[in-house]
Image (tube, rainbow, N blue to C red):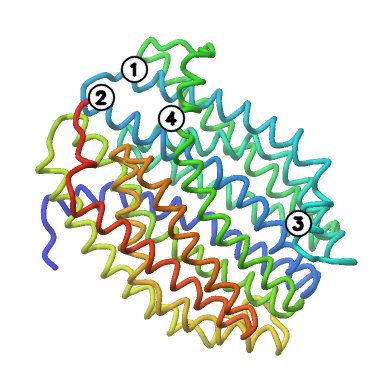
Amino acid sequence: MPITTRDREILRLAVPAFGALVAEPLFLLADYAIVGHALGTTAVGSLGLAGTVLTTLMSLCVFLAYGTTASVARQSGAGEHARAMRSGVDGIWLALALGVALIVACWPLAPAIVDWFGATGTQADQAVTYLRISLIGAPGMLVVLAGTGVLRGLQDTVTPLVVAVGSFALNAGLNAWFVMGLGWGIAGSAWGTVLAQTAGGAVYLVVVARGARRLGTSLAPELAGIRQAGTAGFALFVRTACLRIVLLAATVIATRMGEAELAAYALATQVWTLLAFALDAIAIAGQAITGRALGAGDIAATKDATRRMVQWGVWSGIVLGLLVVAARPVLPGLFDADPRVAGLLLDLLWPVALFQPICGVVFVLDGVLIGAGDQRYLAWAGVWTTLAYLPAALLASGYGVVALWCALGVWMAARLITLARRAAGTAWLITGT
């Protein structure tokens, strides 16, 4: 596939975005390795359970990044730079407010949330401990999302890469020290994550504040702008909620299958997340390029970029799938998995690899439509694809964790159909601010 000018533009945004995106799952994998070596299978399951809850909460707020990226990119493409930065500042304030709200709402509910998954005994106690401590980092995590959206909208994916690598390297180092050095157990893993995420959020506050001063944009909160940012993000919230319902349902089913099944599912999910973030790098480029091009009124460039990014998604998915197959024999050993967990993980990695080309196209088209501001369609598509998944998951629950993972293939196929049909039309090609 020869490299074109369009490819260079995509790579300029996607390569740093790839580094930033994979930094998180790489260091989360390091957390699993540390916890697995120091604390054992039960703790790995607890980390996977609590991590699923936290990932769900953060994912439901991902509109802070995606919505801000689309808004800032579109307004920048139209030449409204001060207005673009105002959107970013409003997004930061919304992130801080939501972060505090999550702590207040979820802290007392932590035992009930863990119990809902079906965990008991030591596994449940450790999951509650990890969840409650990690909630303290929620404001920092959400500021990172909003700040990342601002910079991506301004076509800057290098700064998020630097911040991501720095904060997650700090996370890995602190976790190793707290868990293995100080013997704090699973609480040490949570505290390391909190400190690293808060540090990352502080860096974004400084970067966005400097950009706002340069453009003469006030840093004071504007209630109308914050309210508008929240309203605009509601459809993305629905879309993301549907995604999380799918993953939560799978985790609940895996939990009820047993500790070994839950541990294997948690480890396979981390591998899949790493691959998803790698593919999502092209989607991030899609958000920024689509928003800017439509803001400038250039429909031809939008279509051309979309076609090229879909090609990149397909080939990237094929390569990642082959890499999973090649790395499959050694992955269980990285987590010091016991024989039962290792065997299940080896089986799970086959469907993980098989679905990657489909994932590549789905993530790219999802990013393009987000960049176009087509959130309402994405919300409805999310509802229908979730309804397609749930019966398949319930059917698979009686056939083991591998069948459960294969049910995700039904979900991804449904997403591919809904996104491809929309992208083939013209209803999403709306220009201007």
Q: How far is mark 4 from mark 3, CA to CA?
A: 42 Å
Cβ atoms under marks 1 and 2 closer than 8 Å: yes
Q: In percent of the image, x 68 and y 49: which residue is there?
A: 193
Q: Position of residue 125 (x, y in %)?
A: 87, 59
Q: Which residue is mark 1?
A: 83
Q: In percent of the image, x 43 and y 84: which residue is there?
A: 325
Quadrant location of the C terminus in the rendered image: top left
- Which residue type carries mark 3? Trp
> Nearer the viewer's eye, disc 1 or disc 3?
1
Instruction: Describe residue 2's horizontal placement relative to residue 373 as left or right.
Output: left
SS type, badge 1 = helix
| Mark found first going from the N terminus, 4 or 3 | 3
Give the tally of numbered discs. Answer: 4
Q: Which residue is mark 2?
A: 433
Q: Which mark is residue 229?
A: none
Q: Position of residue 166 (x, y in %)?
A: 54, 46
The residue lying toward the viewer, choosing from 12 and 255, is: 255
Q: Position of residue 169 (x, y in %)?
A: 58, 52
Name above or below for residue 404 compared with residue 212.
Answer: below
Q: How far is mark 2 from mark 4, CA to CA?
A: 14 Å
Q: Which residue is mark 4?
A: 232
The residue lying toward the viewer, choosing from 171 and 95, is: 95
Q: How far is mark 2 from mark 3, CA to CA?
A: 49 Å
Instruction: Describe residue 300's horizontal placement relative to residue 386 as left or right.
Output: left
SS type, badge 3 = helix
Q: Which residue is mark 3?
A: 177
Name above or below for residue 246 compared with residue 147.
Answer: below
User: In the picture, residue 281 is in which quadrant?
Assistant: bottom left
Q: Residues within 10 Å of mark 2 (few under 14, many from 20)?
A: some
Quadrant location of the N terminus in the rendered image: bottom left
Q: Residues within 10 Å of mark 3 (few under 14, many from 20)?
A: some
